[in-house]
Structure formats: structure tokens, C-alpha cells
Image (spheres, coloured by chain):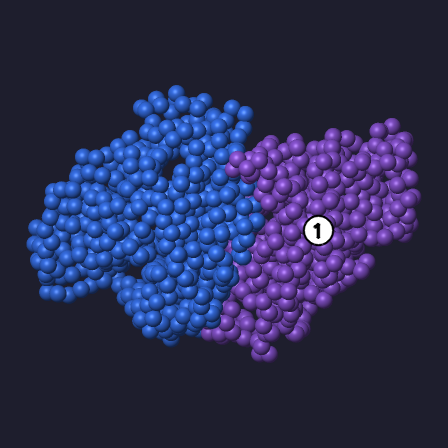
Chain colours: A blue, B purple
Amino acid sequence: MIALLLAALAAPALAGVSEPNDGIDPRAVRDAVRDEIARSAELSLPDAAPPHHVLVRGAFGWERTARSAFGALMGSEARALDDLTMEVRAGTPAFDSTVLRVDRDTAGFERSGIADVPNVRSLRETLWRDLDRGYKDAVESLGRAQALRQALEEGGPLPPSWQVLDTPTVDERLDPVPDAPDLSIVEDYARALTAGVRGRPLLDASASVFLAAGHGLVVATDGTSMLASGEASRVTVSLSIRAPDGETRELSRTWAGDGLADLPTEEEGAKAVSAMAERLERWAAAAPLDTPWVGPVILRGRAAAEVLQDVVVRSVQGTPEPARFRRWNQSVARSDPRFEPPGTRLLPGGWTVVDDATQAFGDPCCSRYDDEGTPRQRVTVVEDGVVVAHLMTRTPSEHFQQSTGHARAQWRGPAEAEPTWVTVTPARALSEPGLMAKARRDARLAGVDAVLVIEDADRAFGRFVYADGREVPVRAFTTSELDARSLRGMRFAGPSTTVEPRGTIRYTVPDLLLSNIAITADEPSSRMPEPKRTSPLWAKTIP
Amino acid sequence: MPRLHRPAVAALAWFTSTAAAAPPASDPVLDALQAELDATMAAWEGEELPPYFLGYRATDSRTAIVEATAGTLDRAPRWTHHRWLDVQARVGDHAVDSSRRLRGDRSRGWNGWDGVSLPVDDDLPALRHAIWTETEQAVQEAREAIVRVRTNLAVKVDPEDDAPDFSQETPVVDLQPRAEMSLDLDTWGSVLVDASRVLADAPEVLAHELTLYAEARDEWIVTTEGTRIRQPWEHVRLSARADVQAPDGMRLSLYRWTDLHSPDGLPDPGTIDGWVHGLRDDAIALRNAPAGEPWSGPVLMRGRAAGVFIHEVIGHRSEGHRQKSEDEGQTFKDLVGEVVTSPAISIYDDPRVETLGGEHLNGHYDYDQEGVPAQRADIVTNGVYTGFLMSRTPLPGIERSNGHGRAQRGRSVVSRMANTVVETSDPWSDAKLKEALLAEVKRRGVPYGYIVDELAGGFTLTGRMTPNSFNIRAVTAWRVHPDGTEELVRGIDLVGTPLAALRNLVAAGDHVGVFNGYCGAESGSVPNAAVSPPLLIRALEVQRKETDVDRPPLLPKPGTPAADRVRHATQGDT
């Protein structure tokens, strides 16, 4: 759990910093939270019952961040990890205050910080203020939902608002939290990552390093009580370049792990960044696509994961969308679900998709419990190419009512289902040469003399592979939409690789061969003018 | 809508309990700025539409913060270090250049962040690359802008305002020592933690914090005219805040704060203890006070309130750039040489003043953000309107800056106030002012007058499309009844229109109050001060402050006896 909690905080916290809360007994924090949520049973308003569920989620410890550009430090910070979120639900599990969402927020969900050096008093004061506000907001939202219930149910009966657990999770796994590294170590590491590309003709070469460690807790009025310790680390490197015709391109890469030891060494990181720079230079030197092209495309690694994520995984994330309340006319609108119902074909026959955190507990992708305190489960979501299950939180849908342990906390709203480690298995996987042979045959059938291979997440980097083995990079192109129909018609897949295209979610996916994909020249919306002179940092320019 | 307010202390970072490191003797930032300036101008020499002016403003800021609440450190002591760059490129010439606003264009222009971060390492090539990136973009944008400006001039009728776009100023070379600050944040953390317990113990205080914020900043200004400035700015603020909620739902925040140019004058723990006890008592008294009602009549502004009144009523309307914009009300544009207030009153703005009335002034600086030396600007002399605060954007007949071009980092410079000072040639004692207030109450036949001491800030509307008015956000105000008794009230704003308010200014007192704060307007948030003796205004209007509609907290504050009683009852332990 702690790894997930920390990872969830990583992105927004990159701009922040603080001091470790050494010496704070996490059990004292947990007890303070228990005391204050026990008091929430006393919350009441005229004609309103106390909340039916209150949950507090917290993470406290230390964070270190450093940012560099071209080997120079841009900023660094050392601060406390101090996140505190609260969920207050008014009404009943069958119909509660989360039915409606107003603007972007759901009433009853509050977010605060914990003091850098938490004490019981400050923690309870924060909880007291936020739970009070959350309860009032939730009661108001519930009243609004009750007034509009008839309209809400016009599209059919609503699923229950909340799954009540028979057995709440009680777990305590406290380990010593490592001391925070000296900030200068993090700074030097950030510098080292980007120092090696100083002479290259890049517009930007920046690195952002984030380290955190501490304790996490989830405590709820239903008896859920969890306490854990953990570490998180993340590095994001971002490079950008300008091609001679003014098109600019950014290439970024993220490494995530459970501490400094999980990150690449300075040498490994610098080498990877240097390879990224070389790749960008090749991209900038490539000719832009000038005429439309239709033919076979092989999606590899991150490109394959991106497509499968967009088309398949999003279709099995089963958290229903709350109805949206429109202030201007005091009405509600139920949103169309983003998921596909069970029985929908997403992939060719014989393909399966499984999400399984249990294979790698402790990895950044795969905490033991989700953000609602539910144990992770292995879920086969697609069998023989057809949807058979959804990834679920404790918010039931019309199709599935039980959590599968995939809740990911959201910013001031109910948790949403999110995958952990997705494995896509084709009916039959060809070897790499075998897949290329099939692709070449498709090229001949399409009347073209090359196969387009795309490996990067945003599909901006491609190369034509000709029959004689020549490879010609190409840029400034757009692929036709790769949708469910494209994937259902997919005939061949290659060897699998494991990638993390975004954040900590892990994908093990095969290379995908898609036939008759249309590629058109991409006209950038704006081109960067040619610089009057070159940067004093560059040793060379793009020819 | 310009606003004067206490600054919210920015969230900052990086922990150490010692002092900000002393800057090195060499100056790579200055070297990088100069090198890029020279290289850019050389590259454009002989080209079509080259920049005629290029100016850099770099800021190096080391900030410290420590914050306490409920007997612990809400923010542990830490220092952070940031650098930023602002680039100004002008194409054309001083008379007509790329900065000119297009006539007929109703948009207010880009008002967001427009700067760039610089490396905090003294790494010359990396610094130069960051400067190069921003300069390329600024010059290209200026070259595009001048084409639009020239087309606009050809299409539209001749403007009424024939002043040039950019003033000619004498270059300045002044490289001052870098800012340095030494502050024992750990000790301060302990002091603030101790003091915070007083507010934590008060059941009525819903939230509170004590904050020490310090900044040691260096600013470089380097231009193609030959200006090379490095000037330090040091600032320390100690503040305490207490939030309460009245039974009718109104939320009230009360503050104590002091602004200083160095940590040397920070109050001792005993004084801070007095602050928090006073703050607690005032907050509780205000919570229990009646809410004010709409009313009109005489008002005596005292303490910090009087300076803010002048800041909102006349200060913003005397900013030079407002006299150029056809969207602005231009209240005083045609009143130069006219009587606008009591002949005893003079008003000026002078950034050179470091202290006044024993207090450090927030608006002190040697050079403005365009590199022009700070100068005193007279606004009203013996009741007669005299002139404007000027940046390097001239007005017809006023071609030079008087050193009031100011901007927050990342924002374009406009003319702004710094230290606005009110003086009187006929000082009245407090007793005489109150006597005159009561006389005015009786003369008008109103049930009471008002004395306003403390406020949260104010704002004013200076445009033509909105009512030309001001609003003073009072915090502590008293109704003064005809028998002289004073009754504390809460929840009022003082509103009015500028010319009427100035003409109703009857008299001023014999001692000054200083409001140190930050003022927000087009060029962002800039530190400034408003200094004034008490002011008696014959008539102002009071309006109700907006109020929250939420009930006060449903449960007693934890850690207080009432909460403990509830807890015991919950546990069946009564």
C-alpha cells in the first residue's frame, strides 16, 4: 500500500520538498486518526444521519527532489511527505452523496497536509475541520441527489453507491524507514543525468528526480485499519529538439522504483539519456513524410502498450462515472460508461488480458492493497478476445458489484479502478523474424515496398524497413486511428516485452502487426522559427 | 482590479536550519547576461527588423520559511533557491516600437507568467543556453509585433496620445554587494511552536499559524543602453493568523505581522507571546461582536487603515500607464494643478525611504525594474494634484521615468506605487479628531460614526466599464456613539468613489501608521508600503462584507475540554 500511496503523490509533489518526520510513531498517527473518525459518528445535522462511511488516507515521511538541465541544477527541495485525504459519505451504501459530481469535485472528499512534524493535536485539528466540512458538503450533495432521484433513474436503476465489506482489512507492516539522503546526493544525481548531452543540439535536456519514504495508513469507520512503510523513487528525463523545418519534438522517459537503488546508476542514466539524444537527432535529421502511405505497421514495446492501453484496458476499467450536476439549470446528466460491457469482443479469438499485482508485490506497480484497503486480486478481464470482467473499486457498477482491489485514489473524488500489471497474451506469438516476414508479405499485398516500424509511445518515431534490410527514419506523420476494429482484425503478434509507458503501471505486451494502416503527412500547428544563432552550449547543429 | 493585501507566504522548500549560503565573489549570472546581450545584438546587426533595445532582468532568490501550528512545526525550517529571467526585446524605435498596444484591440494582453527559470548553479554555458532560448523567442515576437503595430497605425486614425513608446534614460552602472542573510531557523521554529499553543488552546480559534518568512534576493538588470545593475533586496516577515467563525457563519481572519529589511529587528519571544494573546483575545471579541449594517457617515481611519485608504483612492489612479489606456477611467489625468483635497494634505511616493515612523518600509529600492534610479514622485502638494508615478512609458509632456517601473518576476513592467506617504501641515491630536468625528455625527444626525483601525486590505476599480470605486476591507472597526462610547463591530467594508472621498477628507492626525503589504495589479504582486496619519473623512459608505453560510463546526475542537467531554460520553465513560 505504501508504495502506491507514495507513487500517487509523486507527480504533484515534484515541485515540493521537506524534512523527514524521524521519530514519529506511525501508530500514534493511526490512533489519532481513529479517535477523530470515531468522533465523526457524532456529526449530525437536522434531518440528516451521521455519515455511513468515513475513510482517512495518509502518507507521512520525507521527500527529496532535484531538477537539472544540461548538467546544471535548476532547483532542489527537501520537505516532508505529508498527504492526508478524507472521504465522507452521507446517506446509505445503496444511495449516497457520491451519486452526483458537481463540477470536477465530489462532495465529501477533502485533501489536506499533515504537519511536517506531526503531533496528535495538529493532526486531529486538521481532521476535525476537514471532516466537518466534508460531512456538510456530503449532506448537501445527498439532498440534491434525492431531489433529483427520479431524473437520475430515468436511464434505469442506479447501482448501489458503495460496497460494504464483510471483512474489513486489518494489516500492519511497519518497517524502518531509511534516512533521507543528503540533498546534495540527489542534486548530483540529477546533474549527472543530463550533463552528458551538453554539446548536443537540443532545445531542452532536463531531469527531475523524486525520492520519498515514510509510512502510509488507511483507516475507516468500517474497521479498515492499515499501516505500512515504504519507499518510492522516480526519475523523468525530457529532451526536445528542433528539426530544420521548424518541427519540434519532445522525448521523455520515466524510471520508477522503490528507492534510490532501483533507479539507474549515474552512468546507466547518462548513457540512456545520451541514447535518447541520439534518437532525437536521428529524428530531426529524418525526412518528413511527404506523401500519404498505406501499408503494414509493426507496433513495438511502448507503442504496442499505448494502443492496448487506449483500446483494451480503458474498456475494462469498471468504475462507473458519477452523474454530473449542472448548476446553471439544477439538472443532472448521467454519463455514458467508458467501459465495454461483458461479452464485448475487443481482441481476436484466443487472446487473453490479465491484470495481476500478486505476481510482484512490493514493486512500484503492485502494492499488496489498493487505495481503499482492499487486497489485490488477479483478474482475467479478456478471455478469448471477449470482455469477461472489469477492474473494480468499492464503487459497484451495473455489471459488477465486488471490488477487485484496483482502487486508485483521485484528487477530491472517489477512487477509480486502475490496472497494475497487465499481461496481454496472443493466441500465437511469432518470432521477430517471423513477424517481419508476415509484415513483408502484407506489404507486397498492399503494393508497398516497406514495413513501417513504430516503437515510441506517441507514435512519432518511425522507420521504414525495406526488403533489403535498409532502414529509413521518417517523421512528421500521423497514423490513422487505431481503434477496436483495428485490433480485432489483427492477425499476428510477435515476442512480448515489458514496459511502463506511463507512471508505474506495467504492461507485458507482444509486438503487434496491423495491416493496411494509413499514414498521412502531419502539418505541425506551429513551427519554431530558425534561431538567429546557435546556442552557446551546442557543439554542433542539425545539418 | 488592483488589490492591496497581506502576502500569502509562498510555499517553499529545502531544509537547513542555518543561514543562506553567502554568494561567491565572481558573478557568472552577470557574465552570462552580458555575453548573451552582446552576442544577440551582434547577430542582428545589419539585419531587417533588428531589436533596438534588449534588456535582461535576472532574479536570484534564497527564501526561508518556518511555520508552526498547534504546538508543532507545520513547515519545518527550510531554505530554497530559485533563479528567474525576464527578457524585454523592442523592435522599431523609441517613438514607435513593438510594445505599443494595438488600437481597437480590447484584449488586455498577456498577463500571465512569461519568464523562465535559470540554473541555480553558476554554470556559465548552461546559464547562457537558458538565456539564449528566451532571447530568441522574445526577439522573434517583437519582430512580429512591430509589423502589426505599423499596420495598425496605418489603418486607424491618429491617436490622441502622441507620447513616444519608450523613454530615453541615462544608463546606470552600479554593482552592489550580493544579499546575505543569517537566520537561525531552528531557534525560530521553537519560539513559534511555543507561541502557537496559546491559539491552539482557544476553543473558538478554528485554525491558526505563525510564520517566519525571509528572502535574500539579488536582481540584475543589463540592457543594450549600457545599464549594468546588481541590487540586493532583503526581507523578513513574521506573522500570526487566527481564524474564527461567528455564530451567523461569518468567517474572520485576524493577523499580527511585521516586515523588516533584516532579521535584526525581529521581536523577542516575550513580544510574540503578547502578540498571540492579543490576537486570541481580539479574535474572540470580534467573533462575538455584532455585524455591521449598511450605513453612511463620518469615518476616522487610524493606524494601518489610513494608508490603505490613500493607496486605493488616489494611489492606483496616479499610476502613469493608466493615463494612456483608453479603457481606464483616468480620474486625475486632467486634474493636474487642480485642488483635489484638503490644502493641509500632501501625498508623495518615494521608494528611497527605508524607514519611517520607526518602521521598515516594504517599498524600498534603489532602482526600479527598468534600471531607473528611484525618485520621489509628488502626487498631491498642499491639496493640489501634482503628478503621476512614471515608468519608462512616457505620457504627453512627461517623457522621463521617475523610477516607478515595477513588476513581479515574469510580468511586464508598468508604473506602480512603492512607499506612498501622506503628510499634513495641520496635524490634529487623536482627541481632536474624535471630537470632530462626534461633531460630524451630530451635524449629520446619524446614530454613530466609525473608527477603523485594522483591515485586511482593499481593492479599487479604475476602468471605464466598471463603477470607478474603491473598497476597504475593514477587520476591526468601532461604532462611535454620540456620547463617545465605542462598540466593536465586524463584517464591514468601506466603499466610495475617489474624488468624493478625497474632497471629504477633513483633517489628518499627528502621528503615522504604516501598512506594509503586497499590491497586486497588472504587473503582478509587488511589495509596498502605505504611510499615513489618521484621516477623518466626512462621509463614506459602509456595506456588509460577504459571509459564509456554513454552520460553525458541529463538534467541539479536539483537545479542548468540551471535546473531551464528548469523547468520554461516546465511550460511555461519563
Tell me the amino acid under the disc marked 1: Val
**Nearest the camera: A169 or A432?**
A169
Q: Position of residue A1 (x, y in %)?
A: 36, 51
Q: Position of residue A157 (x, y in %)?
A: 32, 24
Residue under numbered circle 1: B276
- Name the quadrant containing residue A533: bottom left
Q: As drawn, which residue projects farthest toward the front?
A: B573
Q: As drawn, which residue projects farthest toward the top?
A: A150
Q: Residue at left 8%, top 50%?
A: A445
**Nearest the camera: A184 or B149?**
A184
Q: Position of residue A95 (x, y in %)?
A: 39, 28
In the rendered image, which quarter contains the C terminus of chain B?
top right
In the rendered image, which quarter contains the N terminus of chain B?
top right
In this rendering, does residue A177 appear at all?
A: yes
In this rendering, does residue A2 appear at all?
A: no
Q: Is residue B114 above or below residue B383?
A: below
**Nearest the camera: B568 or B443?**
B568
- Secondary structure of the residue carrying tag 1 is helix
Q: As drawn, which residue projects farthest toward the bottom?
A: B25
Q: Residue at left 46%, top 63%?
A: A64
Q: Is residue B528 above or below residue B550?
A: below
Q: Is residue B482 above or below residue B45?
A: above
